[in-house]
Each structure stands twice: as C-alpha cells, then as structure tokens.
Amino acid sequence: MSQFQFANRLATLPPYLFAEIDRVKNEVKKSGIDIISLGIGDPDIPTPDFIVEKLYEAAKKPENHQYPSYVGLLSFRQGVADWYKRRFNVDLDPENEVVSLIGSKEGIAHFPFAFINPGDLALVATPNYPVYGVAVGFAGGEVEYTSLTAENNFLPDLDSISDESWEKAVMLFINYPNNPTAACASLDCYKKLVQKAKDTNTILVSDAAYTEMYYDPADKPISIFEVPGAKDVAIEFHSLSKTYNMTGWRIGMAVGNASLVKGLGKIKENVDSGIFQAVQEAGLVALEKGDPYAEEFRGIYKERRDICVSALQKMGIECMVPKATFYVWCKTPTGYTSAEFVTKVLRETGVVVTPGNGFGGPGEGYFRIALTVEKDRIEEAVSRLAKL
Ligand SMILES: *Cc1c(COP(=O)(O)O)cnc(C)c1O
C-alpha cells in the first residue's frame, strides 16, 4: 500500500495535546476503574421529543429528499431572525443577514476562506475553541494569539495588541460566553471591541454558541449586535447544538453584516449543498417552541454546577463560579502543571477533566470540568477528587 504525503497545511496543525491523556484513559479503563468523563462539552440530555417528532414528520416529505438550498430554507432563516428579535431585540434581514450552517463549527471553519488571503493576519483571543486558528491556517493566514487572563476576567485586553497588529489584522475571533473559561462579555466590552474594529477596519467574529446556557436571568448573556452599529463590522456564529441538546443534528447559523454573510455563503455554495431540509424544519420548531425546554436544561445544569462548585471550594480548588456555559474553569493546585494534575486525577480517581493548556498557552495552570453527567455522577466525581 502506498503511503501518501499529507499536504503542508496539515503540518500547520497544532500537536494533539490530549494524546497522552487518551492513552492513560485507556489504561485506567482496562484496569477496571469506573471512568467518569467530565471532559467533553457535549450535552448528555436528549433532544426534546417535539423536535424529534418534527423530524419524523418532515423526513417523510418527498420534497425534503432533494438537494436543499445552500443558504438554507427561508423559513428557517426567518425563524433565526425572529429568535434574534425575541431574545436580543436585534433586527436581521433573513434574506441577506442570515445563513444556515451544518453546525456553527462548519461555518467558523469556512469563514476565513472568504476573507483571508495567504499571509493575512487574524487575531484569536485565547484560551480558545481550537477551530479558529486551524481554519485561519488552512486558509493560508497567520494567527496572533491574544491572551485572556484572570486579571482581565478573561476578556480581551485591547491595549495588549500592538497598533501594528491592529492595522494588519483582517479579523479578530472572540467567544462569549467563553469555552473554556465560562467568562461572559458585558455590553461595555462589546462596545469597545466594535469601536476598535471600526477604527482599524477589522472584522469581528463572535462565537456565541452558549448564550442560552446561563444560570441567573440577571446574567443573561448578550449578542454583539446589541451594540448599535455592530453590524458594520461583525458576524456572529450561533448554534442549536448547546441550547436544545442537538449537537448530533448539525445545525447552526451565522448572522450579521450582509457582505460577511454573503462571503461565507459563496464558500459554502462551492463546498456543501446545505442542511437536510427536514433537519431545518425541526430546527425551526426548536427556535419557535424551545424556550421552556432551554429553561428546564438551565435548571439541571444549575443543580450540577452548585454541587460541583461548592465541593471544589471545600477542597480548596480555586474556580470561577460560571454565570454561563456548562464549564467550570479551575486552577490546578500549586506544584502541578495542567497535564500533570489531570493525569494524576485520571490515574487515581478515574475522573476525566481537560487540561487548560489544550486550549492555548494561557490555559496552562488550569483545568476544565464539563458538567455533562447526571448530578449523582458529579457528586461521585467530586467525592473522589476530595479524597486525592
Ligand atoms: C460547541 C461549540 C460550538 C458549537 O458547535 P456546533 O458545530 O454548532 O455543534 C461553537 N463554538 C464553541 C466555542 C463550542 O464550544
């Protein structure tokens, strides 16, 4: 069998930091220890029945068996616009300011192809969802990472980016509520970002996948488009994945500046042929009728969060009490790197958590807990940690 050489762009991929942890996990599993995985950000609760029922019904319609429209059904895009209006009081034109996506990851990964030329610079706030930097690299661009630190509440420090970089940068990637730190952006933070983006002609790429996963109505996360004029410079990626437990369905959306939406649409038109229309019909009912379910899920995560955070605090592990997302971002105890601590926890307790450095350099010294198992398993996991 011939061994084919990968293209150079694959060599630009960052090393896979979880390889060693995966190896230890398999070893621990083999030794018969009951593994509790708090590693992956994938909801464990099923998709609500009414959404699944809608899929059954829509899957039976022959007109849904043909190629969908690449920009998405107008009814779905209208549903997205209506949801943005209801939830954020943001007006969107469904024809020109909304594109449906095969999950927001797909859209994020394709977006740089529309706006980055080889050698162009993109700024990425880090620790971060790895797709931003990978996608820019695939498009031939360069990435400058800007650190999110506890001192700044994990919000971007605009002054830490040089004038030269602001001048050069084509786009800046931000993600609030943030994976992995759980930080939320205030209106003031978004205002400053929009102003800076306008002053320096930089595209703002906002990844807002977690806005519905909050704990207190007083802390309801916002959209960047709540800033007047944000549409001049921004595109926002959103998704049904986390809100309605639909990660497997692959449906999301990008909204905002019409030329940014159009550019992304042009790439997609040449790469994929849209989302199965039955999934879009089901996605539409999720947006229309899913609010009470999202509320129920928030209650479930809140219970888990409170159990987890209070146990961590009791054992002296410093952590942010998340106001949104299902992540708890914790400091590794003194004397351990992220990888050392996570490996120790795994070996000695069978609990899987994610080392912070896997999300970028500034994540070193932290680990991430995902609240994606039932509360008695969270209780079991933290009681094992307490015995360490
Ligand atoms: C889960 C997640 C997404 C959503 O991905 P989909 O492709 O829509 O399932 C986007 N951004 C971040 C930061 C995430 O954690």
Image: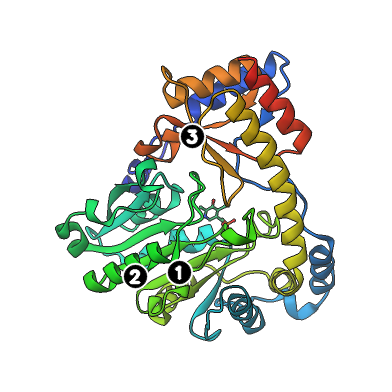
Q: Residues within 10 Å of mark 1 (few under 14, many from 20)?
A: many
Disc on res. 1: 3
Q: Quadrant of residue 201?
A: bottom left
**What is the spatial separation of the Cα atoms under label 1 and label 3, in whole angstroms?**
51 Å
Q: Is residue 1 left or right of residue 361?
A: right
Going 22% across and 58% down the picture, which residue do you hit? 119
Residue wearing tag 1: 224
| Secondary structure of the residue carrying numbered label 1 | helix
Q: Is residue 332 left or right of residue 371?
A: left
Q: Is residue 94 left or right of residue 142?
A: right
The amino acid type, in three-letter code, at marker 2 is Val
Does the residue at mark 2 contact the one at mark 1 (Cβ under 8 Å)? yes
**What is the spatial separation of the Cα atoms under label 2 and label 3, in whole angstroms?**
53 Å
The amino acid type, in three-letter code, at marker 3 is Met
Residue 110 position in % (x across, y down): 44, 63
Q: Is residue 372 visible?
A: no
Q: Quadrant of residue 261?
A: bottom left
Of marks 2 and 3, which one's residue comes earlier in the chain? Answer: 3
| Secondary structure of the residue carrying numbered label 2 | helix
Q: Residues within 10 Å of mark 3 (few under 14, many from 20)?
A: few
The amino acid type, in three-letter code, at marker 1 is Ile
Of marks 1 and 3, which one's residue comes earlier in the chain? Answer: 3
Of marks 2 and 1, which one's residue comes earlier in the chain? Answer: 2
Disc on res. 21: none
| Secondary structure of the residue carrying numbered label 3 | loop
Going 53% across and 20% down the picture, which residue do you hit? 343
Residue wearing tag 2: 194
Split into quadrants, the picture shows ligand 1 in the one at bottom right
Residue 309 in the image: above or below residue 285: above
Instruction: Judge by depth and name the residue closer to the eye, 179 or 324.
Output: 324
